[in-house]
Image (cartoon, rainbow, N blue to C red):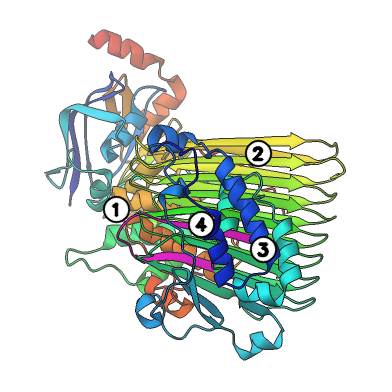
């Protein structure tokens, strides 16, 4: 089983240090939840892992299967099996969902012999995954994320996750902006995809998504570090007590 | 180069052109008048030529003009541009129209396609009238004057009342080391309730130095007619392309003009559009994509003279390298043109820090009860879009290519002619990878692009598409 290892990761955004030594290891098949107050660095971690040019790693290491990915461009990281479901998926006007998925599928599933999957293979997988997630065919002719509702955007992200079959998926606040029904649909979708080959990091503020995607491990991020780790009971404690006690705890440590 | 006080071009040159063609005296007079205007009008100025491209990058005086057709070896000249299976096609090599082919179904409609010189002998008074009605006026427009004084080629198309072209007519103009400027005048005259589709492609096969292609293209859409025209320009960087395109649209007629500008060192294009009858409508689509040191100077004038008229012009451009573009779009709604709708939009995307694009849209409205909007934006390619696609496994270059081709889609997908639409996508994609592609015929095109694109023309009942401001 491959592992995603984050070791003492420090990162800056426009000169300001946001990540101040993150340590986290996720194995394929495991589900981890990452919680924490606004501005604690959760989304920065997600974007840094995929290599967004705005985020600069100043110290530390990120390994997939023992191989460092910090020098790799985002597309190479995706090919190594890393996936980010975006908190705010951008729209790309003029590019249909279909042509985008085809390009991404080809890019990620092209083998060492440079053999790209055939159009038939692609269409078959697509039909099967869309069926699994209950996504309508009309989705395919629409421009990527353009005019999508909040729920549609997040479902489109999960469809991409299902098509690209990564080893590790980071779901960055996939539950934000969704009503109860949409949340259930999206979370159930993730449930259908989760398997022993997929390690998941769910970034969230709320306990409710964790009712559907049951994490084995829950971590709390505070001011750029993971300051507490535990099981589901930790998320319940956060729900009940809020994040205030973290501050006291951090104060006590310092 | 400073403007010479006295024009190098002479009346003798003009009369020689006119005499050799056996033109009627009114036309020789018309040309003399045009030469006078040309000599007295100042050079057109544009920040593009002055600041960045050296003064007057396309002063016609630096190019010679021909007084006669030059011999073209048909087979050699069009090598690589034709499959041999084409029908309903007009071929022009440098300044010579060498081939006009219409199939039987076409011929039955009574549609006439003639070299402009033949049309002058056959339909003298009609041509005289149409020349005088052109919207780019040789009296006030220097390059329209140049064209009028020196044109030796071009075609005339007359679509008789009620005739409907069974398919689109293609015209291929291929330059191959022209010995002098190519100056051509083309007119489409669509009579009442007729229907016509036209696709013009301009290519360079070979060049050994700068050359000028001056083009004048006018559509007269009489009442109830429907004319769709597309022009694709893929000259090489030696080419200086100076064009005036006009459309005069009568009551309840509909005309569209699409341009796909990818080639040429300097492209200077003027659109003059007149909505001249109740219910007239016009759609314009401009696609341009420049790289290296290319300069595109585009200008559009959309004039509503009649009530219930609709006019929409959308331009989208992408600029790489050190290329520059400028777009001026003006919508005028005259008194009495009540209940008219006018729309002009220009959006440009920059791929390099040194690329530059300016847009100057304007409205001039003399009446109430109209709807007129314009929008313009110029922005660098969106870093977040690039990252999103890269995070899905697409290498940076492929991610940007997808964004760029997508950026053009809102314009390309609305080009009425299917072949032109596919051709635009195909040539734009080629341009991304630095290839100058050719449209060739549809079968070959589909074979080359692989899958048959199943994207239908983007259906839009409302030409006043919602404003789309590029994120920046």
Q: CA distance from mark 1 to mark 4?
A: 56 Å
Image coords of residue A15 (percent x, y): 28, 19
Residue ID at (70%, 77%):
B122
Name the residue carrying label 1. A166
Chain of the residue displaying label 4? B
Q: Is A187 left or right of B344, judged from the image as shown?
A: left
Name the residue carrying label 2. B374
Do labels 1 and 2 touch, CB within 8 Å? no
Work out whether disc 3 and disc 4 sit on a shared chain. Answer: yes
Select label 3 or label 4 by which is in front.
Answer: 3
Question: Can residue B29 be seen at all in this image of the molecule?
Answer: yes
Q: Dot 3, crowdedness within 10 Å: few (<14), some or many (≥20)?
A: some
- Determine which quarter of the picture holds residue B218: bottom right
Q: CA distance from mark 3 to mark 2?
A: 40 Å
Chain of the residue displaying label 2? B
In this view, B12 is above or below A2: below
Question: Can residue B414 be seen at all in this image of the molecule?
Answer: no
Chain of the residue displaying label 3? B
Name the residue carrying label 4. B214
Magenta segment, which residues? B200-218
3 or 4: tag closer to the N-terminus:
3
Q: Secondary structure at mark 1?
A: loop
Work out whether disc 1 and disc 2 sit on a shared chain. Answer: no
Select label 1 or label 2 by which is in front.
Answer: 2
How many marks can you see? 4
Q: Secondary structure at mark 2?
A: strand
Q: Residue furthest front?
A: B12
In this view, B174 is above or below A217: below
2 or 4: tag closer to the N-terminus:
4
């Amino acid at each position: 089983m491959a592992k995603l290892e984050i070791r003492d990761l420090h990162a800056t955004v426009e000169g300001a240090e946001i990540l101040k030594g993150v340590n986290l290891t996720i194995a394929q098949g495991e589900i981890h939840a990452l919680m924490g107050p606004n501005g604690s660095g959760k989304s920065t971690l997600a974007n840094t892992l995929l290599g967004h040019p705005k985020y600069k790693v100043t110290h530390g290491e990120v390994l997939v299967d023992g191989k460092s990915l910090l020098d790799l461009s985002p597309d190479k990281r995706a090919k190594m099996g890393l996936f980010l479901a975006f908190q705010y998926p951008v729209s790309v006007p003029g590019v249909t969902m279909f042509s985008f998925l085809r390009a991404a599928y080809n890019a990620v599933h092209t083998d060492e012999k440079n053999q790209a999957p055939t159009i038939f293979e692609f269409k078959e997988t697509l039909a099967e995954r869309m069926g699994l997630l209950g996504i309508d065919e009309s989705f395919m002719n629409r421009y990527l994320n353009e005019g999508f509702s909040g729920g549609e955007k997040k479902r489109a992200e999960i469809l991409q996750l299902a098509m690209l079959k990564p080893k590790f998926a980071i779901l960055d606040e996939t539950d934000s902006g969704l009503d109860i029904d949409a949340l259930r649909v999206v979370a159930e979708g993730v449930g259908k995809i989760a398997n022993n080959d997929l390690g998941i990091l769910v970034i969230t503020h709320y306990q409710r998504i964790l009712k559907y995607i049951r994490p084995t491990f829950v971590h709390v991020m505070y001011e750029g570090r993971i300051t507490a780790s535990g099981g589901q009971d930790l998320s319940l404690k956060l729900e009940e007590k809020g994040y205030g006690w973290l501050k006291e705890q951090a104060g006590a440590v310092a | 180069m400073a403007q010479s006080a006295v024009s190098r071009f002479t009346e003798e040159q003009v009369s020689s052109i006119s005499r050799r063609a056996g033109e009627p005296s009114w036309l020789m007079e018309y040309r003399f008048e045009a030469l006078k205007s040309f000599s007295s009008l100042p050079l057109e100025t544009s920040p593009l030529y002055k600041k960045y491209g050296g003064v007057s990058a396309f002063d016609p005086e630096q190019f010679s003009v021909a007084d006669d057709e030059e011999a073209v070896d048909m087979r050699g000249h069009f090598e690589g541009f034709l499959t041999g299976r084409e029908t309903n096609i007009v071929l022009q090599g440098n300044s010579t129209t060498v081939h006009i082919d219409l199939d039987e179904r076409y011929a039955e409609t009574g549609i006439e396609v003639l070299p402009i010189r033949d049309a002058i002998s056959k339909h003298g008074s009609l041509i005289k009238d149409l020349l005088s009605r052109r919207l780019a006026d040789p009296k006030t427009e220097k390059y329209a004057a140049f064209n009028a004084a020196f044109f030796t080629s071009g075609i005339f198309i007359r679509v008789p009342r009620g005739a409907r072209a069974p398919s689109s007519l293609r015209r291929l103009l291929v330059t191959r080391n022209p010995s002098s400027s190519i100056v051509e005048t083309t007119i489409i005259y669509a009579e009442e309730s007729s229907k016509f589709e036209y696709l013009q492609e301009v290519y360079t096969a070979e060049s050994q130095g700068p050359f000028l292609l001056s083009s004048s293209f006018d559509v007269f859409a009489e009442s109830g007619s429907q004319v769709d025209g597309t022009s694709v320009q893929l000259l090489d960087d030696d080419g200086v392309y100076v064009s005036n395109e006009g459309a005069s649209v009568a009551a309840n007629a509909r005309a569209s003009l699409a341009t796909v500008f990818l080639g040429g060192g300097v492209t200077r294009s003027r659109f003059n559009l007149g909505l001249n009858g109740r219910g007239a409508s016009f759609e314009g689509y401009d696609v341009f994509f420049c790289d290296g040191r290319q300069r595109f100077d585009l200008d559009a004038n959309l004039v509503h003279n009649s009530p219930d008229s609709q006019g929409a012009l959308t331009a989208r451009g992408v600029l790489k390298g050190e290329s520059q573009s400028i777009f001026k779009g003006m919508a005028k709604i005259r008194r009495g043109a009540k209940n008219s709708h006018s729309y002009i939009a220009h959006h440009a995307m920059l791929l390099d820090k040194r690329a530059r694009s300016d847009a100057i849209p304007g409205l001039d409205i003399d009446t109430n009860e109209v709807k007129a909007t314009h929008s313009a934006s110029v922005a660098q390619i969106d870093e977040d879009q690039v990252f999103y696609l890269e995070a899905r496994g697409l290498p940076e270059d492929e991610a940007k290519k997808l964004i760029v081709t997508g950026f053009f889609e809102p314009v390309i997908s609305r080009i009425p002619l299917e072949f032109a639409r596919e051709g635009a996508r195909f040539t734009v994609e080629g341009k991304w990878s630095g290839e100058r592609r050719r449209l060739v015929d549809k079968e070959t095109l589909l074979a080359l692009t692989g899958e048959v694109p199943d994207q239908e023309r983007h259906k839009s009942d409302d030409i006043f598409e919602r404003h789309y401001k590029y994120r920046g």
